[in-house]
Image (cartoon, coloured by chain):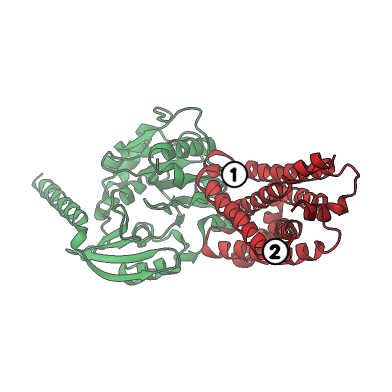
């Protein structure tokens, strides 16, 4: 039993890195599509990108804060998976409720700077905060040795930022040429939810005792 | 008869001179250059021909040109072809121009229709300034300019239930296409601004794949339209209206009435009327072509191919 567990266990870190990569991919993919989504109501001037980037940076910063805080209590792969599922659900309104939301803001605010800022907030703040929680939470799950914590964090940033780079280029070069914006968003959402579920399933298979809180000590023995 | 011949010769000669000047811009003198929020703006002058350029490196970047000694004369074929709109609606009272360039179109239209209101919409305030300073663009109680994204202007105008008799979309150039001004939704909003006799003229530079999707998108919103183009140019004017397109006989009659009015602007309306081809007669794109929508609008990527 322990042997089988150990075999499974060695896949845990690669799984976390894969998830972190995908979240990076989705964040930038969504940010890029943000310009497309806002353009019909707020134009495509440089201040539209100002609004979008501001909101993404702001929400990521809060996300880091919240994710770090959350990781101090009963950190588990199970909860990690839940973050992905929530993120996946939270980006769905970007595809399905953006139209009336932007229309309402367009009617209320004449100045496209503040209109686009508010619309970006309404659409992207919550999902991006949740996606921002993933990085610090990943570090919590991956670090077992204080001496290696910097290395682990460095590799994690490498993987997730590489994901962001690929998410940007693939979305802007190819996906927009093939698919509708809402379809791409929906696929991102599905990927996040599926990855979250797979993390939870992996966690369950790994712990037949059902004690999800022991993940960290197990990780330590695995090292 | 003799007089006619001389006029003809002069016109041929000056056309040759203009073409020569346009083709040898390399050694033109730069009289103004600035970097705006959106682009590099250059004003160049050579042999009395002053041109506005938006980017240095590309060959197809001349936005607007003016003969310094004869400013009311229109230089570009596409600006002349825009006048085909008058064959669809001869008496526009409310004119909307999206994309100012040098403002030469606005100036000419004010001279032809002094009582018409002309609203110019331009996203870049620097372009308006350059148009005023170097191309004689003027505003008065009839002619105004608004600094705004074309899409936003149109959306707000729809809310205010404004109507226009002639809408000119001239926000596209060879280098970059504002993708949110190409979509079905945008065209529907623009259509809502057209008065009963309203006519829409879009100056576009689409090639290959974009040509097909652009044509299909216009047709999906307006039904059949006129393509106005002569083989010399890569660009074309899409001409369409709320009403069914006029018959050839009506066009010929209107062309006759407009001939003398448009001559000072070097617009040969009879010749231009021959460039008009209805898509009801000839549709040169595949039937199952994908449409451009707010959800799918990779116009610039499609134009690369």
- Name the residue carrying label 1: B295
- According to the rendering, which colour does chain A have? red
Q: In this view, does A38 lie to the left or right of B54?
A: right
Q: Which chain carries label 2?
A: A
Tell me the green chain.
Answer: B
Q: Which residue is drawn at 48% across and 50% down?
A: B165
Q: Which chain carries label 1?
A: B
The N terminus of chain B lies in which quarter of the figure?
top left
Q: Is mark 2 on a helix, strand or loop?
A: helix
The answer to whether one can see residue B194 in this image is no
- Name the residue carrying label 2: A59
For the residues beneath circles 2 and 1, the answer to whether they share a chain is no
| Viewer-nearest residue: B62 or A52 | A52
Q: Residues within 10 Å of mark 2 (few under 14, many from 20)?
A: many
Q: At which x and y percent is residue B79?
A: 33, 51
Nearer the observer: mark 2 or 1; the answer is: 2
The C terminus of chain B lies in which quarter of the figure?
top left
Q: At which x and y percent is residue A118?
A: 68, 63
The answer to whether one can see residue B225 in this image is yes
**Total numbered badges shown on the rendered structure:** 2
Q: Residue at x 44, y 42 (%)?
A: B302
Q: Is residue A151 left or right of residue A146?
A: left
**Farthest residue in the left direction?**
B2
């Amino acid at each position: 039993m322990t042997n089988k567990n150990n075999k499974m266990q060695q896949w845990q870190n690669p799984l976390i890195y894969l998830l972190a990569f995908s979240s990076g991919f989705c964040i930038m993919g969504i940010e890029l599509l943000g310009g497309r989504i806002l353009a019909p109501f707020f134009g495509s001037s440089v201040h539209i990108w100002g609004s979008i980037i501001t909101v993404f940076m702001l929400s990521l910063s809060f996300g880091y804060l919240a994710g770090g805080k959350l990781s101090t209590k009963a950190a588990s792969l199970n909860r990690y998976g839940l973050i992905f599922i929530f993120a996946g659900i939270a980006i769905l309104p970007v595809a399905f409720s953006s139209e009336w939301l932007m229309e309402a803001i367009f009617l209320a605010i004449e100045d496209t700077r503040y209109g686009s800022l508010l619309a970006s907030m309404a659409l992207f703040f919550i999902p991006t905060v949740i996606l921002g929680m993933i990085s610090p939470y990943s570090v919590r799950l991956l670090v077992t040795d204080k001496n290696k914590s910097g290395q682990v964090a460095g590799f994690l940033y490498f993987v997730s930022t590489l994901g962001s780079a690929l998410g940007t280029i693939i979305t802007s070069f190819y996906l927009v040429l093939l698919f509708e914006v809402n379809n791409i968003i929906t696929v991102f959402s599905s990927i996040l939810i599926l990855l979250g579920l797979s993390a939870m399933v992996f966690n369950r298979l790994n712990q037949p005792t059902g004690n999800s809180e022991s993940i960290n000590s197990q990780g330590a023995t695995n090292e | 008869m003799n007089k006619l011949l001389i006029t003809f010769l002069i016109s041929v000669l000056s056309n040759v001179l203009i073409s020569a000047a346009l083709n040898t811009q390399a050694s033109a003198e730069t009289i103004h250059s600035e970097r705006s929020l959106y682009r590099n703006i250059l004003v160049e002058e050579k042999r009395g021909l002053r041109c506005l350029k938006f980017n240095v490196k590309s060959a197809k970047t001349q936005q607007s040109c003016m003969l310094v000694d004869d400013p009311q004369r229109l230089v570009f074929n596409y600006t002349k072809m825009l006048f085909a709109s008058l064959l669809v609606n001869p008496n526009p009272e409310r004119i909307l121009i999206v994309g100012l360039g040098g403002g030469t179109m606005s100036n000419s239209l004010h001279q032809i229709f002094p009582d018409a209101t002309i609203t110019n919409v331009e996203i870049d305030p620097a372009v308006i300034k350059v148009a005023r300073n170097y191309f004689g663009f003027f505003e008065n109680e009839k002619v105004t300019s608004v600094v705004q994204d074309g899409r936003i202007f149109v959306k707000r105008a729809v809310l205010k239930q404004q109507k226009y008799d002639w809408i000119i979309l001239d926000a596209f150039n060879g280098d970059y296409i504002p993708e949110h001004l190409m979509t079905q939704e945008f065209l529907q909003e623009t259509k809502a601004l057209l008065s009963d006799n309203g006519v829409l003229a879009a100056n576009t530079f689409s090639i290959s794949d974009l040509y097909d999707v652009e044509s299909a998108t216009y047709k999906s919103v307006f039904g059949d339209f006129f393509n106005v183009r002569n083989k010399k140019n890569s660009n074309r004017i899409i001409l369409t209206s709320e009403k069914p397109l006029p018959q050839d006989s009506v066009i010929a009659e209107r062309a006759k009435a407009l001939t003398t009015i448009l001559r000072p602007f070097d617009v040969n309306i009879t010749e231009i009327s021959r460039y008009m081809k209805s898509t009801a007669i000839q549709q040169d794109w595949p039937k199952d072509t994908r449409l451009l929508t707010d959800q799918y609008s990779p116009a610039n990527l499609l134009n690369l191919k």
